[in-house]
Image: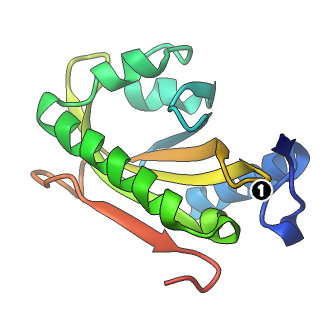
Amino acid sequence: MKKAISKQNLSYTQANLADELELYKKILQVFQIGDYYYYSTNQEGEIKFLNSDAVNVLGYNADFDKAFFDNCIHPEDAEHINSFKNEIDLFRKLLPFKKTMNYKVQYNFRYRKSDGEYIYLLHHEIPIEVTNEGKILKLLNLDIDVSYLEPENKPTLSFIGLKNEP
C-alpha cells in the first residue's frame, strides 16, 4: 500500500515536494558548486521524472531511460557503482523504517556526455516515498558536475545522516 506521509511523519506530498525542490534550486544557485540536474527514480532505478537541466549538463535529450544512463557511466567506474548500489540496498534494509528517510547517499563517478567527453558527477539520492512497511517507492536524485574538483578521483560512497542521525 502506497503512503504519502506528512512532513511530521517523515515524508512529503507532491505539492510539498515541488515547493521544496524550488527552494533547493534557489539554494543551489546561491551556493552552486557546479551545473546540476535532478530526477526521481523508483527503487529499481527506473527514471520517473528528469529535470530539463540534464540536457544542459549531459547534452542528451531529457527523455533517456535507465539503460541509456547506465551505459554512459565510465567503464572503469561501473563496477564501483554496482558495488555501491549493493551496499546502499543492504544499508537501507538494516535501517529501522522511521530512519529510512533520514539518510542520503552520495557517490561520485565519471559520465560520458553527448560529445564523448567524460565529466565527474557527484550523485546524491534520498528516499522521498515509502510504503507502510518501509519499502522505498521513490528516490530524489541530484547529480552535480564537479569536474573541476575531481580530476583523477576514485569513486567514493558516503552515507550522510540527516535530522541529527550519525
Q: Bin the neighbour count of mark 1 within 10 Å (Cα to Cα): few under 14, some 14-19, many 20 and up.
A: few
Q: In which quarter of the image is the N terminus?
A: top right
Q: Which residue is drawn at 67% across and 58% down?
A: 24
Question: Residue 67's spot in the image, x, y percent?
Answer: 40, 17
Question: Residue 39's spot in the image, x, y percent?
Answer: 59, 36
Q: Mark 1 points at which residue?
A: 20
Q: Is mark 1 on a helix, strand or loop?
A: helix
Decide: is 156 above or below 118.
Answer: below
Question: Residue 158's spot in the image, x, y percent?
Answer: 35, 65
Q: Residue at x 14, y 53 (%)?
A: 154
Residue 76, by quadrant, is: top left
The number of discs equals 1
Residue 46, by quadrant, is: top right
Q: Which residue is drawn at 31% across and 16% down?
A: 114
Give amino acid for label 1.
Glu
Say left or right for 2 vs 135. right
